[in-house]
Amino acid sequence: MKEDNFFERVYEVARLIPYGRVTSYGAIAKYLGAARSARMVGWAMNGSGKYEDVPAHRVVNRKGLLTGKHHFQGTNLMQQLLESEGIVVKENQIQDLEKIFWDPMKELS
């Protein structure tokens, strides 16, 4: 699988994450048929800054941790973007993850 093509597919899925919801790197990888490629999804999110329409802030690790926050400008931008959508974040972790988790396998099938 060509990296650029995979990244584009990751961005297509990320663009579908609804406002006020989050998903995980692994959930996107699984949806794309590459269940062991969560880290590649992370790399795609890291490179998504050149696209204004990719809501990378809505992609977190499976435990709801803001593991990608250091790729955003400023120290708290990822958290601020999430909080502006009504998502509660405490100590770099999404609260009520089960309630706001968006699973592409369920939502896009």
Image (cartoon, rainbow, N blue to C red):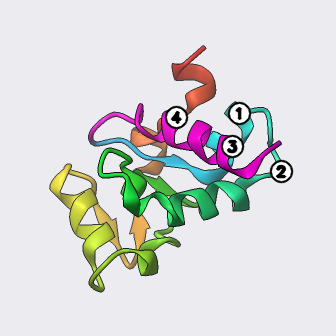
Q: Is residue 11 magenta?
A: yes
**Amino acid type of the residue that numbered disc 2 sits on in the rendered structure:** Arg
Asked if the residue at tag 1 contacts the one at tag 3, i.e. Cβ–Cβ closer than 8 Å, the answer is yes
Asked if the residue at tag 1 contacts the one at tag 4, i.e. Cβ–Cβ closer than 8 Å, the answer is yes
Name the residue: 52% across, 34% down: 13
**Amino acid type of the residue that numbered disc 4 sits on in the rendered structure:** Val
**Amino acid type of the residue that numbered disc 3 sits on in the rendered structure:** Phe
Q: Which residue is mark 1?
A: 32
Left or right of 40, for residue 101: left
- How far is mark 2 from mark 1, CA to CA? 10 Å
Q: Is residue 95 visible?
A: no
Q: Nearer the viewer, residue 109 or 4?
A: 4
Q: Is residue 71 magenta?
A: no
Q: Main secondary structure of the magenta part?
A: helix
User: Residue extending furthest top?
Assistant: 109
Nearest to the eye among marks 4 and 2: give it. 4
Asked if the residue at tag 1 contacts the one at tag 2, i.e. Cβ–Cβ closer than 8 Å, the answer is no
Label 4, residues with CA under 10 Å away: few <14, some 14-19, many ≥20? some
Span colored in magenta:
1-19
Name the residue: 51% across, 42% down: 11
Tell me, for residue 6, which label it has, or none.
Answer: 3
Q: Position of residue 61 (x, y in %)?
A: 58, 61
